[in-house]
Structures are given as C-alpha cells and as structure tokens.
Image (tube, coloured by chain):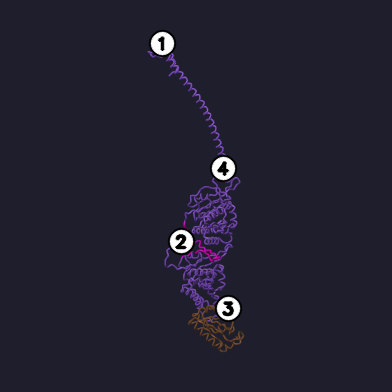
C-alpha cells in the first residue's frame, strides 16, 4: 500500500522540479530518544515513499552547534527538505507519517 | 547611606549599570538568576537589555543578546543613536548577538520534539564570549512559533533552570498582557525579580516609569520611578530614595552682592537652598544672576534652569544691569537650560534637572522660577517634587537659588508656605509703593543658622548690578525712592541751617570779646596812669620830707631847741599823716 502511495506524488514532483532527487537533512542531538526515533522514522519513511531518489544527511547539533545557527534550527529533531524547493521544515520525531506526507505535499491537505 | 548590617547570606547582585536602577535595587538585579522586564510596546525593554549587556561588557562581564524579534543589523542600527557600538563589542568578543528566528508558516509539527537546538546555540554563544549575562528579547515570540504549548512551557521551565545552572544573570523581556504582567504568564517561571516599565500619558504629557514589582530576598524601592531615554540610554531617577542624612557645611557662599552678604552674616551656607520670592519685576532674576556671576568668578560651575526666558534673553537682560555672563557660558562655567514648563510632566522636569546635575556637576543651581511648575501640576505634587529636588541638591552639596513669583493680590508670605519648610534662606523682595512710585526693597525673611539682618533694605538696579541703599528710617518706617531723597535733602538743609546759626552766634560772641578786650586795654592804660601819678606823688613826698628834715636840722642847728631831743614831729607832719598822704 505504501509503495502505491509513493507512486502518487510522482507527477506532482515532476511539476516542481526536473530533478527527482530529494535532499533531506535531519538535525538531531546525540542518541536521545527523540533523535533515535526520528532517524528510524525518517529512514522508514524514505524507504517507503521515496524509493532511492533521496539523500539523508544526519547532523548532530551537539557536535557542532554552529550549524544549527546557520540553518536557524531551534527544535530537535528538525527535518529540513532542502530539495526539491520550496524548503520545508518538519519538527518532531516524524512518528505521524500522514503529517509528513502532507507537509511534503505528497498528499493533499485535508 | 545609613549604616547597614551586611550579611554574607544576602543575595549576590549584578549591577546593571543603568543609572539609578542599581540604587533602587540596592546594587542591581540578582546575580546568576533571571529577571523579568515587562512592559508594553515601545517602553524601552530592548534598550534596557542592551544597556545591561553593554555596561557588563565594559566591566569585564561579556554578554549574549538573544534577539527573537529584531535582526542583528537592525538592532545595531537602532541603538547606534544611543551611543552603543554593538559591532565593535562583537568584534572584541565582549558581546554575542544570537538571532533566533522561528517562522511558523515554514514549519510543520509531527510528534515529540524539544528545543535542544536552542540550548546548544545559546550554550555555544555563551562559551564563545565567556558570557556572564544574557538577554532574551522577547522570549514570548516562541509562543507564536510553536503550536504545542505544553512542550514549549516545559522547555521554558528547563531553559530558566539551565540558565541558573550556568550561573547566567539573565534579563527576559516580555510584553505586558491584559490584567497580567506578561501575555504568556512568564512571571510564573521568573520569580526572583520582576521589573515593570511603563509609558503612559497623563494630562497629555507622556512619562516613562519603572517599578520593581518583586525582588525576592532583598529590600528595594517600591515606588514608580520616572525614567528618561535620551542620547545616553536609560536614566532612572531614584529621587525619592533620599533621606535627611546630608552633610551640613559651614562654608559661606557669597551672593555676589556684598551688602546682601552682610545682611546674611557672610553669605549663604554651601549646600543650602535659597528662595527668592517677589512680585513680577521685583528683581528676582537679577539677584540670581549675581549669584551665578559670583560663582563663576570663584571658578565654580553654575547651572541655570530657566522656565520663562531663553538663554539669549537672559544674557542680554543681565548685560543691561552690568552682569555679563556670556564669557562664562563660553568658557563652560555657566550652563543655561531653558524649557517651557508645559513641555513635559513634573517628573520629567525633575528627571531632566537631576540628569543635568549629574552630567555637569555644578556647585550652584538656579531655578527661575519654580512657580511655573504650578501650571502643570497641583501644589501638593509640586511640593513633593521640590522636596525631592532639595534633598538631592543637599546630598550633592549644591547651593541652590530658586525664584518664586508672587502674583498680585496674594499675601507675600503665604504663597510659598507650602515649600518654606524646605528652604534654608528666604529672601523676600517687595515693592514699596508710595507717593506714586514703586521702589524695590528686600528683606531676609529667614535664614537658618544665621544671625541675619532684620532690616528692610531698599535696592536699585544700576548699570553695575543690584545696589543696596543705606537704610533710611523715617517717622513712618522705611523711606524709599524719592521720598527718601526728599527726606535726606530736608535733613541736610536742617543741618546747614544749624551750622549757619552756630556761626552767627560765634561771631557775635567774638565781637563782644573783642569789645571787652578794648575796654580792658583802656582800663589798663588808666591804671598805669594812676600808677604813674602815685609814683609821682610818692617821690614828691620824699623830696618834701627830705626838705623838711633839712629845714628842721637847719632850724635846730640855729635854735638848739628841745624839738630834736623830744623827737616829736612838727604839727604839719601829723596832720598830713592823718589825711593818709604819708604812710
């Protein structure tokens, strides 16, 4: 079911950008419960909805707080979709897959 | 300051460096704890924070400014006009500006989150400059950035605890809410010290006020204190915090009018307050100008607050009575600040004077006139304000001259009764109206600690300034003006007349004496004539006796009679003797 769902956004994405590749950044702090959950949820989400057209960059803010400043990150975890534009931010542990789909315009907002 | 027992347990305080606030709070805001600054928009919260950090940076306590609302560039621009160079401080690693921007429209929320990134960023900022102080301006913005209020509140609680743990002296600004100190109830988290800033209008006059609502574990002034925001930043005026503990100098200060000094037994005391009251045109400003000039001549700074005339007008007018103050204005010994009383509220006037005194540190202050304050506030408030001013002046040992205009029809002494207890020396100027003239007279109504003159003295404004005239007491009291001149003329005529009379008498006596002298001379002449006659007679007698004797001898010789034997004188001699011709 999830694979089918992933097929839905394909025509939408081609509208946004010719390049299909997604560039995602996840800001976490060390091995906190929320961070671990977010990483797991993100990986699961990508595998289910984005096939292989994505790159994930996991950034540990604890190791380099200056990056958080540069990218204006306040909450942890924060997922930033750099590509495709527009840039979108989702905060939270990404446990609600539906919300993520809506946020990334992979599903119409109700 | 009265002696105070300082215990080690007392709260450690962090001086804000904001003029006046540290006095109200007895040393500053609580060190290592958060302080909440709340107030409506435009009341000076951000400026408060910036000044707190800049002052800290100057004293070797670097700080972090966390801007939730303004971008760093905007912030720097906004405070440049107040003389704060944030960019330089940032380059010197004394200040770090952390811009936290949360754009709700760009963010979606799903699941659990926290504000760890904020903590790490703040931690990094604090470590970068080794900050001891931090300002969060305005933290409440976060409430519009995140929808999960429960998480946010928990995180804020954690943030305050974290700041405390790191020993940060924090200032958190917040908008004033309806019926509450802050919109989001931040006072719930920041319970150590809460300061409210206010900017409100009364009688169309806006005044900024500050109040320490709460300060756990310390005593503090609880009043509302007016404050200024000017080119030097915030200036709180803790004027009510002064008590009657000032020094009392025994030094005398000359008024610049020697005769007046004499009336005051050598001048007024240093640090005392002199009230010069009188009707319009009585010479109040002229006398105060003398005081100003005398101060400048001694090399002391003098500050004039004029509420009726412009500085130029004062200088011009005083030049006409020979008091040239312009040279002192040029060499900086005299400063003249002119303002309309209605420009701002009473508190603000006091604040302005207060600040001007602190900036300029004069030894002499002249307020001309204080009565103009009554047009902007009721007498009770004016009195309270003047009391605070006088207390402050005494503390600073500034000698003050305040003029007071008595309007026509009012009792001269009743008008200022309200403030008479505040002042030390009261010089009453009055018009003496008589014979179609209005002349000026002065009188020392009171002068504390001085054996002052009890005379009512007339004075005139000459081209060389105020001149006191020797008192002339006529049969109906003091005579002034032309009646004095007339009386003096009459007196000198009387003296001349007496002198003439005496001369005439003397001359008559001299004449009589001369006559007597002549008479004496004539008598003496007569006397000597008699004397001559007497001598002539005597010599005649001798010749005659000798002749008689010779005759007798001759007869005796011829007769050998017994006459020679008996020795009896002949009868002719006896007879002569009886007539007293012969002794």
Cα–Cα gap, marks 4 and 3: 96 Å
Q: Position of residue B403 (x, y in %)?
A: 55, 54
Q: Residue furthest left?
A: B565
Label at residue B558:
1
Label at residue B260:
none
Q: Which span is picked out in magenta? A: B219-247
Of callouts 4 and 3, the N-terminal one: 3
Q: Position of residue B131 (x, y in %)?
A: 49, 73
Badge 2 marks a residue whose secondary structure is loop
Cα–Cα gap, marks 1 and 3: 194 Å
Question: Which numbered mark, 2 or 3, is in the foreground of this view?
Answer: 2
Of callouts 1 and 3, the N-terminal one: 3
Residue B225 magenta: yes
Label at residue B488:
4
**Chain in brown (letter):** A
Cα–Cα gap, marks 2 and 3: 56 Å
Q: Are marks 1 and 2 on the same chain?
A: yes
Q: Position of residue A99 (x, y in %)?
A: 55, 83
Tell me the chain of label 4. Answer: B
Q: Residues within 10 Å of mark 3 (few under 14, many from 20)?
A: few
Badge 4 marks a residue whose secondary structure is helix
Q: Residues within 10 Å of mark 1 (few under 14, many from 20)?
A: few
Residue A21 magenta: no
Q: Position of residue B272 (x, y in %)?
A: 50, 55
């Amino acid at each position: 079911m999830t694979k089918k769902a992933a097929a839905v956004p394909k025509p939408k994405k081609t509208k946004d950008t010719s390049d299909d590749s997604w560039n995602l950044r996840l800001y976490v702090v060390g091995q906190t419960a929320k961070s671990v959950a977010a990483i797991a949820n993100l990986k699961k989400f990508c595998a289910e909805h984005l096939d292989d057209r994505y790159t994930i960059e996991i950034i540990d803010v604890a190791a380099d707080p200056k990056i958080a400043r540069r990218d204006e990150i306040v909450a942890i975890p924060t997922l930033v979709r750099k590509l495709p534009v527009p840039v979108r931010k989702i905060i939270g542990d990404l446990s609600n897959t539906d919300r993520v789909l809506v946020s990334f315009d992979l599903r119409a907002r109700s | 300051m009265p002696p105070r027992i300082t215990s080690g347990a007392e709260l450690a305080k962090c001086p804000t460096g904001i003029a006046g606030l540290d006095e109200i709070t007895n040393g500053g805001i609580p060190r290592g704890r958060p302080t909440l600054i709340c107030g409506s928009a435009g009341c000076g919260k951000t400026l408060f924070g910036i000044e707190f950090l800049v002052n800290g940076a100057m004293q070797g306590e670097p700080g972090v400014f966390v801007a939730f609302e303004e971008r760093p560039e905007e912030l720097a621009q906004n405070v440049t006009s107040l003389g704060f160079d944030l960019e330089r401080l940032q380059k010197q690693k004394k200040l770090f500006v952390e811009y936290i921007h949360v754009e709700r429209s760009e963010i979606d929320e799903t699941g659990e989150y926290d504000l760890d990134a904020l903590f790490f960023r703040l931690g990094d900022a604090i470590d970068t400059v080794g900050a001891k102080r931090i300002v969060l301006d305005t933290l409440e913005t976060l409430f519009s950035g995140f929808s999960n209020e429960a998480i946010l509140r928990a995180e804020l609680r954690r943030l305050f605890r974290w700041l405390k743990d790191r020993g940060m002296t924090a200032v958190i600004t917040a908008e004033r809410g309806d019926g509450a100190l802050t919109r989001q109830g931040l006072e719930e988290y920041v319970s150590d010290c809460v300061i409210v800033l206010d900017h409100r209008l009364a009688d169309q006059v806006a005044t900024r006020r500050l109040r320490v609502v709460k300060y756990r574990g310390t005593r503090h002034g609880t009043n509302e204190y007016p404050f200024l925001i000017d080119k030097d930043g915030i200036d709180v005026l803790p004027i009510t915090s002064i008590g009657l503990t000032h020094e009392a100098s025994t030094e005398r200060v000359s008024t610049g009018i020697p005769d007046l000094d004499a009336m005051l037994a050598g001048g007024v005391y240093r640090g005392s307050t002199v009230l010069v009251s009188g009707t319009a045109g009585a010479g109040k400003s002229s006398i105060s100008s003398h005081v100003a000039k005398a101060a400048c001549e001694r090399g002391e700074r003098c500050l004039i607050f004029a509420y009726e005339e412009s500085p130029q007008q004062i200088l011009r007018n005083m030049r006409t009575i020979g008091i040239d103050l312009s040279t002192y204005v040029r060499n900086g010994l005299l400063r003249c600040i002119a303002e309309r009383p209605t420009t701002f509220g009473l508190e603000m006037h006091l604040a302005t004077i207060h600040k001007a005194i602190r900036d300029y540190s004069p030894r002499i202050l002249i307020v001309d006139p204080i009565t103009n304050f009554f047009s902007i506030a009721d007498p009770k408030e004016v009195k309270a304000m003047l009391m605070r001013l006088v207390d402050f002046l005494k503390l600073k040992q500034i000698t003050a001259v305040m003029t007071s205009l008595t309007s026509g029809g009012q009792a001269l002494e009743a008008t200022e009764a309200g403030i008479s207890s505040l002042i030390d020396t009261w010089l009453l100027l009055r018009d003496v109206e008589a014979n179609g003239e209005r002349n000026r007279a002065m009188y020392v109504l009171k002068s504390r600690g001085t054996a002052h003159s009890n005379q009512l003295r007339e004075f005139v404004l000459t081209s060389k300034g105020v001149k006191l005239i020797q008192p002339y007491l006529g049969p109906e009291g003091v005579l002034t003006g032309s009646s004095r001149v007339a009386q003096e003329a009459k007196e000198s005529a009387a003296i001349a007349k007496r002198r003439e009379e005496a001369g005439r008498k003397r001359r008559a006596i001299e004449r009589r004496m001369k006559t007597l002298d002549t008479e004496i001379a004539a008598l003496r002449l007569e006397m000597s004539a008699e004397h001559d006659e007497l001598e002539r007679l005597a010599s005649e007698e001798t010749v005659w006796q000798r002749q008689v004797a010779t005759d007798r001898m001759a007869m005796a010789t011829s007769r050998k009679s017994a006459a020679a034997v008996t020795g009896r004188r002949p009868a002719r001699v006896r007879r002569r003797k009886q007539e007293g011709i012969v002794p």
